Image (cartoon, rainbow, N blue to C red):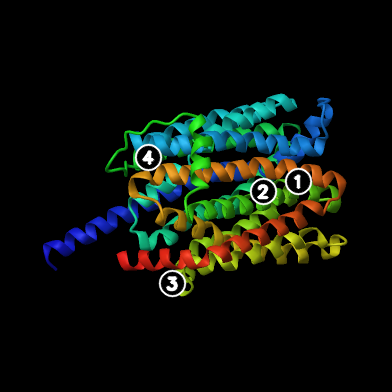
Amino acid sequence: MDWAQIEQRKTKYMKDKRIAILFLTIFIDLLGFGIVIPILPNLAKTLATTSGMPFNPDVAVGVVAGAFSIIQFLFAPIFGSWSDRIGRRPIILVSVFVNIIGYYLFGISANFSFLLFSRVISGFGSANISAAQAYIADITPPADRAKRMGIIGAAFGLGFVFGPPIGGWLYHAGGAHGVQWVGFFTAALCALNFVLAWFLLPESLQSKSVEKRKVSDTFKGLVTVWRIDIIGELFLINFLYIAAFSMMQVNASVLWKEKYGLTEYGIGNIFGFIGICSAVVQGGLIGMFQKKWGVRKMLLMGCPIVAVGLSVIPLANDTQTFYMVQAFAILLLAFGNGLMMPAINSLVSLNTPAESQGQMLGLLQSLGSLARAIGPIVAGGLYHYYYGLPYFSGGILMMMALVVAVLLSKSLKKTEENAIDKG
């Protein structure tokens, strides 16, 4: 073995080590997010009812989820741009520290206004995914980015595997203090995340940008993005996809509790099953899917699969058929999401210059946050009139995304071919 081969293997080892550390950091961050999922929607509805809020309690659920996401919408591209200027590591560390504060405040929430405030803080702290995506782009060749971007999806999936069941168990075990148990435990996890990232996550950015961004630039950036060929259409697909999925993600806890009588513990277990399926698809199968089909076909196949998965969720007539219907829907959603999330991220990355990766992926994350803000609020209003409307509407949105993807298919094929040529 010559010296060049030794250096090549050393470089590969260091990149793999950073990917593993980044995965662990993202996983702990998202585990905290997953823990509150089975608790937050029904807690928000209860506090809105008892606090005498001037709007419908079903809509209040969407307002809490929307507040978290609207802050992400404003700050994700700023965090992405800052990561281009000062590095990925400082952004990740600061955001994790803010999450410690947000989840502590969640644990002591006694009324709707305080709960809302805690989610605003956590929304700011969770606007760091764009920096994590840019970190992966920094150390990954273009042809392998779909597989490496799957690490974000895998971390989301594993956060769902362990987070919601842990959250449901903590809430149940804590009794009258269940919310405190959930909030304080999650804050402690974020503290552990901070320590690990501080000591084990090195900087990845080699060439720093000098561009500065303000909050208003988020809106200007999105207006500009819509005018860019390929990127604009991909952003639209991402918006429709995230809005449709978030309508289910937030509202499902209320549906499962009110219509089918599940407790927070049972809701946590269902979300855990979703996480298992998602982790298997996104963590273990993405490389195979990319090699066999390519990211363009992954996108085209994912849209209708997610559409069907969303639409069948409310079709169970009673508790006897509930678990069979939900299992079928979950399998479809896990497979569809496993195809779409890394495909969209990879295609946006492949069509973006290296020096703007953080900014563009930040705008993509920000648009997703806007969709997560709008989707739950719309779902709350639709649910108030008929419990199945949020899910049927989500299916329609995904079919609209499919139409856009089909119209874009020829351009995406060229992008994929160019990435293969570059290696």
The quarter in which the C terminus is drawn is: bottom left
Give residue 3's position: percent from left, percent from top. 12, 62
Residue type marked 2: Ser
Q: In the rendering, at what x and y percent does residue 417 appear?
A: 39, 68
Sequence-first tag of 1 and 3: 3
In the rendered structure, which disc, 2 or 3, sits on the residue that comes first in sequence? 2
Which mark identifies residue 291? 3
> Label 2 to label 1, Cα distance in Å?
9 Å
Residue drawn at the location 36% of the way across and 34% of the way down: 211
Position of 263 with respect to 152 (left or right) is right
Give the Cα distance between marks 2 and 3: 29 Å
Please state which amino acid type lies under the numbered disc 3.
Lys
Q: Earlier in the sequence, mark 4 or mark 3?
A: 4
Question: Where does label 4 land, which residue?
Answer: 88
In the image, is residue 48 above or below residue 1?
above
Amino acid bearing label 1: Ala
Q: Are marks 1 and 3 in contact (CB under 8 Å)?
A: no
Task: First in sequence, mark 4 or 2: give its number.
Answer: 4
| Residue at mark 1 | 379
Q: Which residue is mark 2?
A: 246
* Residue positioned 49% across, 42% down in the render: 224
